[in-house]
Amino acid sequence: MKMKVKIKNKKEVSPERLSKRIKISPKNRNGLERLLKCQAKRGLKYSKKRAAIIEYFIKADRHYTVEQLYNEIKEIVPNIGYSTIYRTLRLLVDCGMARTHHFGETDTRFELVHKEQHHDHLVCEKCGRIIEFTNNGIEKFQNAVAKEHNFLVKNRELQIFGVCKRCQQRKR
């Protein structure tokens, strides 16, 4: 099914054309289709500010708090509002393109969903750096534990807190 979305000047935009506009790679086009459908359900129209936030968030592929993303993107889009950033990130979460994390802090961080492979996080308690990693042994162990207890896993998240190599070297 080809989906089109009306924008302010009443032109219709296909996911292919919109993905060029906000520079989303072909592999993320399915996510874009989901986002457009989700956005349409909520009665939201195309917005240049929302598109700029989505483009920046996808390209950066980092774990952002709303404030961090706001501080970076306002350099590019000076008249952007904090609430626009928040609402766009919540939209991405609601549409399955991003997920939230709490890395031992009160602030929520948003991360682009990586469909290719599940990953876990190492979190530096000194500088806040987040290192993503995968480990087949951990995956197998968690699956075995779930199977042993006849437990259906819906989601899982492993966070390991410590001090990164850079912070260890600074200390010396």
Image: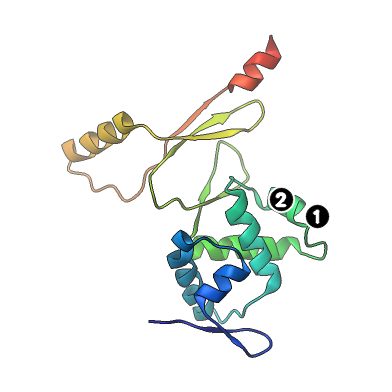
Q: Nearer the viewer, residue 28 or 110?
A: 28
**Classed neighbour count for the residue bearing mark 1: other residues with Cα under 10 Å, few (<14), some (14–19), many (≥20):** few
Q: Position of residue 19 (x, y in %)?
A: 55, 69
- Residue at figure coordinates x 22%, y 44% from the top left: 151
- Residue at figure coordinates x 32%, y 31% from the top left: 138
Q: CA distance from mark 2 to mark 1?
A: 13 Å
Q: Which mark is residue 102?
A: none
- Residue at figure coordinates x 46%, y 81% from the top left: 3
Q: Are marks 2 and 1 in contact (CB under 8 Å)?
A: no
Which residue is the site of mark 2? 67
Residue reaching furthest to the top: 172
Q: Is residue 85 left or right of residue 71?
A: left
Q: Quadrant of the N terminus?
A: bottom left
Q: Is residue 131 above or below residue 115?
A: above
Q: Position of residue 52 (x, y in %)?
A: 68, 64
- Secondary structure at badge 2 equals helix
Q: Is residue 169 above or below residue 134?
A: above
Q: Position of residue 148 (x, y in %)?
A: 17, 36
Q: Quadrant of the C terminus?
A: top right
Which residue is the site of mark 1? 75
Q: Is residue 83 left or right of residue 162?
A: right
Mark 2 or mark 1, earlier in chain: 2
Residue type at mark 2 is: Glu
Residue type at mark 1 is: Glu
